[in-house]
Amino acid sequence: MNQRSDKSSHCGSPEHAVHRRLFLQGSMASGAASVASFNGLFSIPAAAEQARQQGKKCILLWLCGAPSQFETWDPKPGTSTSGPFRAIPTNLPGTHVSQLMPRCATIMDKLAVIRSMKTEPSEHFQGIDVLTRGDQPRPPFTRPILGSAIAQQLGDLDSPVPQFVLLDPCPEGNEFKAFKSGNWAGWLGAEYGPVRAGGKYSIPNLGRLDSISELDHQDRETLRAFLSRKYENDRRSEAASSHNAAFQRVAGLMSCAPLFDLNKLPPADRERYGPGAFAQHALQARHLIENGSTFVMVANGMPWDNHVFQHEMHQMLVPELDNVLFQLITDLEDRGLLEDTLVIAMGEFGRTPWLNEARGRDHYPNAWSMAMSGAGIRGGVVHGATDKLGRNVVEGHTDNRQLFATIFRALGIQPDEEYDLPGLPTFRRVEDDAKAVEEVLL
Amino acid sequence: MSETTKTLTLKKTQDCKLPTSVLDAVLTDDETAMIAGCMDGVYRLQFEPHQEELLYRHDSYVSSVGLLRDDQIVSAGYDGGLRWFDVGQRQLLRTTPAHDFWSWDMCVSADRSRIASVTGQYLAGSYKYEPQPETEPSLKVFAAESGELLHQLPHVPSTQAVAISLDNRFVAAGNLMGEVRVFDLDSGQMIANWTTPDFTSWGIIKSHCYLGGIFDLKFTPDSQSLLLCGMGPMRDPMAGNGRQLWQRWDWKKETPTLIDQTHQGQSGEGLMETLAVHPRAEHFAMGGRLRGGDWNLALFDLDSGDRIASAKTGFRITRIQYAADGKSLFVVGTQGQPKPKKDDSPLPPFGRVERYEIG
């Protein structure tokens, strides 16, 4: 049966109440919005310490629209499908990547690259669905998205810091927009859905009114909580209980609002990551993970869908991704967090080996690449291979189920565990007994 | 359209293929052959009888080719290099690493004494993805004969198009953001610059970044005005469905002024990549890709700006050149790359070269 780990269980035990109280004391003692950690960032020491002890985390760099494998992880130099960019050697002998990825070329020993992804959907919505949920839909049941599944397993609902955060400043995104408006948490329930931030998606009305002092604010909350709990106990009201849970979440968000403020991040870090929205939110993802979030998904609309201007767009997008991955992985390693933090970079499929008339590459699920690093992942591994022109997988075929089995295994989550869903058919976290890609696992 | 504007016809009279995309081409002086810059190298294509020969390669796609004196040609590539080649001797004469990034476009002055090449990688420079400033000079001018670097001139990446005036006095370059800079070719001094916002898209729908810009520009024969081409702004640049757009600017005014642009009702959708001006300045031609509408090759009256002829070629046009007598147009480009059946099986040719008689 699907059980949450002891550390993160949502059982309402006194221990968690103490945690919450300790957290509030820790943060409020110095003024919630201005607590400075050793590195000058807004940080919540108790939560950060708890995050360190709690276990595995995950950052998903969601490359929506689908990047080209030829201009990233699987270049085909000297062939008709190569495109205009060269291939460069990496610190992994015999392994080359696109010339657009010079920084990742220096940390290939920390990365596991799968060059043999082969999946079914060739349209965005279906591709996004399968590569974020791990499987094809089985209507009318909605499988939780990866972030929800991981937050439910590894996260702490009692934490004031949101456990699943989506950072995406783009309000549109074609099929991704449609997908974003759907049910992300599926049968796990809304409490496992993401908190969305980034760009205009600042979290509104989180500031305490100036007319209310911090002490007043705490007193009011204590009184509200007492009366609410009394009402809930007296009448066994689920509505009141739900209202209480929501209020707790908002109160938590209020206390950690500065975590969502890009301007609170150190300028030197911001400069290192690069000025683009995607890079800035990747840095924010690191900061959220450091401070207690369990899963952060970083997206920027759907920029990789280059049916036109393929090379004109990839000349900009790939170097940004290259730097973001490099900074994120080296930062996490420097802070002792890489061992427990899984970083994934992927889209919903790849791009065609051949160029269309509009100087673009079209959708291609038959043979594409993705990369991972960190928690549970063996660095310095290139799994699978495609043929000379990149048309087909010739070795190490990996599909979405195998990929998700690998991700769950890397995070210490049992892939084939059954979901406990009374009244629903049998669902497993990963269906069909799909096996993880052992080669990339520690 | 003005009632006095005379309409013309375009009739295809020649049709050849090359193995890969033709990204630029130039007619030989006797017009019996063409030098073509392709994805896989520089070709000499003889028209009658049809004969194609791969002369040499770059380390990446060839972006531009130009004709020099004495049977020599020069080419530029996505490898950032310029290469001089003697066609008569079939001999590579010189290789010059001109840029760290691609040469997007290269041109040779009418007197064949100078070569101008533009570069620049678009990298994110802000949260909104405005481009970073250049890390190398975006425009370089070389002596055609010696290969000596004469000028290194500034612009903002990516600088995608370059042209030299017919009187050999000015060099102009246009970029992703629609900025045009005009320099004195002798002194290297910038004498005009302005920005037109009409060719650049900021992705609202899919991507918060910039796309498009100026893809070609040409001085009119009197050097007084500049023609620009590209595609009108789109909410979703990935759709490639912006308006087929040219603009004509009086660049010599203290504040450069827009004189004219594609007339309402005379454009379809698609990126326009190339311009050519009639040898006697009767009209100009524009070509590119057809995304929506009924033409991707058209002639426009140089005075009225009216469209006076159009054709649908069935392939993306990358370069147009008038014959010296102005009676025909040579049009080159590419179809989509065919899907390879096997790893080593040759692809059917997808580069296109066509000739149209102007009637």
Image (cartoon, coloured by chain):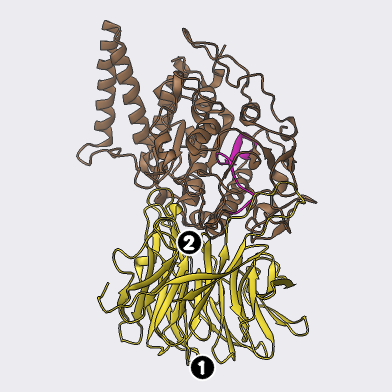
Chain colours: A brown, B yellow
The secondary element bearing badge 2 is classed as loop
Chain for disc number 1: B
Task: Using the image, determine if residue B267 lies above or below residue A62.
Answer: below
How many labels, in total?
2
Task: Please give left or right for residue B186 compared with residue B67 in the image.
Answer: left
- Which residues fall within the magenta stretch? A337-355
Q: Is residue B195 visible?
A: no
The secondary element bearing badge 1 is classed as loop
The percent position of residue B162, horizontal first and vertical second, equals: 50, 78
Front-most of residues A273 and B19: B19
Q: Amino acid at mark 1?
A: Asp
Front-most of residues A368 and B302: B302
Q: Is residue A289 visible?
A: yes
State the residue at coordinates (61%, 67%). Answer: B22
Q: Report the residue that reaches farthest toward the left.
A: A211
Q: Is residue A344 magenta?
A: yes
Front-most of residues A8 and A116: A116
Question: Which residue, given by chain and number where applicable, does mark 2 sit on?
Answer: B289
Q: Is residue A301 magenta?
A: no
Q: Amino acid at mark 2?
A: Arg
Check if mark 2 and mark 1 are on a common chain: yes
Q: Quadrant of residue A428?
A: top right
Task: Please give left or right for residue A334 compared with residue A208 in the image.
Answer: right
